Image: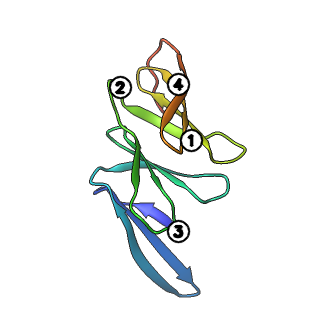
Amino acid sequence: LYFSAQEGILFFYHIKSLQYEMKICADILQPISNLIFSPDYTILLLITDQGTVYTYKPAHSGEAVKLLDACSSCFLAADFLTPGNKYCVSVTISGEVQVWLLEDATCLSKLNLYIEVCIT
């Protein structure tokens, strides 16, 4: 079980029967608003309240890596494009939809919706 706290810490709970073990996986120093696993569960996207997107690879137990930084408009949401986990799509508050290559955060395509976006 992965979950995040208000302080921007990603936790992992290993639960077996009535026993559990807690581990701190990453501390990104920004409140995390969304956690999304890739279809094959090898990468976890962490989206912060400030609109920054990080990747975390549970099998490598390393630090979270900043993928996308909030620039002129905060990233509101992101998700993987399936099949696979090579690409993700994001949307900003200002309505810009972007497709990213996860390997090096290259923006491959963008589309402006010309409308402010919100989550309901």
Residue at 60% of width from left, 59% of height from top?
42
* Residue position marked by numbered label 4 in the rendering: 97
- Mark 2 or mark 1, which is nearer the start of the sequence? 2
Quarter-of-image position of residue 67 = top left
Toward the right, the furthest residue is 83
Disc 1 from disc 2: Cα separation: 17 Å
Crowdedness of circle 3 by 10 Å Cα count: few (<14), some, many (20+)? few
Mark 1 vs mark 3, CA separation in Å: 19 Å
The residue located at (49%, 65%) in the rendering is 2
Dot 4, crowdedness within 10 Å: few (<14), some or many (≥20)?
Answer: some
Residue indicated by mark 2:
73
Mark 4 or mark 2, earlier in chain: 2
* Of pointers 4 and 1, the one earlier in the residue sequence: 1
Labels 3 and 4 touching (C-beta < 8 A): no
Residue type at mark 1 is Asp
Kindly tell me whether residue 65 is visible in this rendering.
yes
Say what amino acid the circle numbered 3 marks: Leu
Say whether residue 52 is left or right of residue 103: left
- Residue under numbered circle 1: 79
Q: Which residue is mark 3?
A: 1
Q: In the image as oriented, which residue stretches furthest toward the top? A: 114
Give x and y (percent) for residue 57.
51, 60
> Is disc 4 placed on a helix, strand or loop?
strand
Q: CA distance from mark 2 to mark 3?
A: 31 Å
